[in-house]
Amino acid sequence: MIISIRKIGSLIRFISIFAVLTMFFYIILGWVGDWLTPVDPYRTPTGQAIKAFRPESTMDSRYSPAERLRLYYWYGE
């Protein structure tokens, strides 16, 4: 069996370039993802927008958790 140093060198060069480019694209995609996501997605909207979800502490407690679960299954939502 003949082991060629040129083939081993080209394989190592290919693997190293592939690893560097993979890390480069991973970092670039992370920057793009950070740029696209809002700073605070849970802040109260401004202008004409309304917040659709109200936390449990601000909801009126006219329904118990069991009653809400029963209504959930009844309406099928």
Image: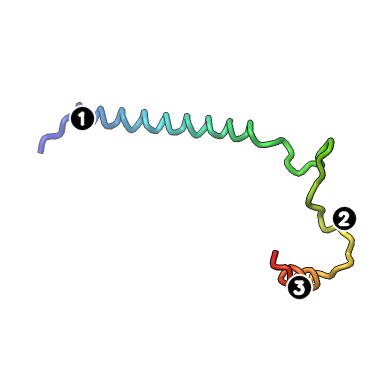
**Which of the 4 image quadrants contains residue 60?**
bottom right
| Type of amino acid at the residue the image marks with label 1 | Lys
Residue that label 1 marks: 7
Kindly state the secondary structure of the residue where label 3 is placed: helix
**Which of the 4 image quadrants contains residue 3?**
top left
Q: Label 3 vs label 2: CA separation?
A: 21 Å
In the rendered structure, the answer to whether residue 2 lies left or right of residue 64 reads left
Give the Cα separation between the discs numbered 1 and 3.
69 Å
Answer left or right for 42 relative to 3. Answer: right
| x and y percentages locating residue 15 in the rendered image | 33, 33
Name which residue type carries label 2. Thr
Of the residues shown, which amino acid type is indicated by label 3? Arg
First in sequence: mark 1 or mark 3? Answer: 1
Which residue is tagged 3? 70
Mark 3: few/some/many CA within 10 Å (<14, 14-19, 20+): few
Q: Which mark is residue 58?
A: 2
Q: Quadrant of residue 50?
A: top right
SS at mark 2 in the image: helix
- Image color mode: rainbow
Q: Which residue is pictured at 59% across the width and 35% down the height?
A: 33
| Earlier sequence position, callout 3 versus callout 2 | 2
